[in-house]
Amino acid sequence: MTMTMTHAVRPNRSAPHSANARRSKKAAFEKKLREYRAFLRDDYDWDWVYILRLLRYKLERTRKCIVANNLIVGTRRVAGEIREVERLLGRVIDDRYFDEVAKPFHRKYGHLKMLFGLRDPQTNTQAVTFRYP
């Protein structure tokens, strides 16, 4: 899939040095920070799926902004392409691919069972045995 984005340049109506522009920019930043903060509450650094969730979230925000403001030529087409990428990222995030691949294996061997031994209080460890039925 190729994605082509053509930007329609719009003039900046407010001078970048005006107090109004600075306040408006600060308010927009604080709003965005609150929205991202809510999203990042369930974000962790130890798994790759969280970076994909962040990318999908950012793509959704970008798509909505493009559509709401009619920012580019071919807004509907580009919005559809971004939505398709969001959908595909959702499939990867859901990670159901292994379930499909594993069905024949589970039919043949059954599901793996984990058997836990007694916990050793001195080392805070326990034996784990993996068994197929």
Image: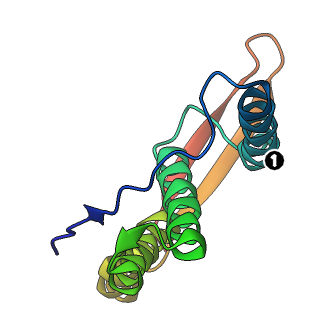
Residue 3 horizontal/vertical position (percent): 21, 69
> Would you say 52 lies left or right of 40 here?
left
Q: Nearer the viewer, residue 35 or 4?
A: 4
Q: Is residue 105 visible?
A: no
> Which residue: 81% across, 47% down?
38
Q: Residue at x 49, y 64 (%)?
A: 93
Across and down, in percent, residue 88 comes to 38, 74
In this figure, which residue is indicated by the disc labeled 1?
A: 38
Front in this rendered view, residue 16 or 99: 16
The residue under the point 41% across, 86% down is 76
User: Mark 1, residues whose alpha carbon is within 10 Å: few (<14), some, or many (≥20)?
Assistant: few
Considering the numbered disc 1 on the image, is that residue within a helix, a strand or a loop? helix
Location of the N terminus (image quadrant) = bottom left
- In depth, the one of 64 and 70 nearer the eye is 70
Position of 15 with respect to 82 (left or right) is right
Q: Position of residue 66 (x, y in %)?
A: 50, 68
Residue 24 in view of the camera: yes
Specify the farthest residue to the top: 122
Instruction: Name the image quarter holding residue 58.
Output: bottom right
What percent of the width, then of the height, locates residue 11?
46, 50
Q: Is residue 74 above or below residue 85?
A: below
Rendered view: 57 above or below 126: below
User: Please, what is the three-letter code of the amino acid marked with disc 1?
Assistant: Ala
Residue 99, picture quadrant? bottom left
In the displayed structure, 34 sits above or below 123; it is: below
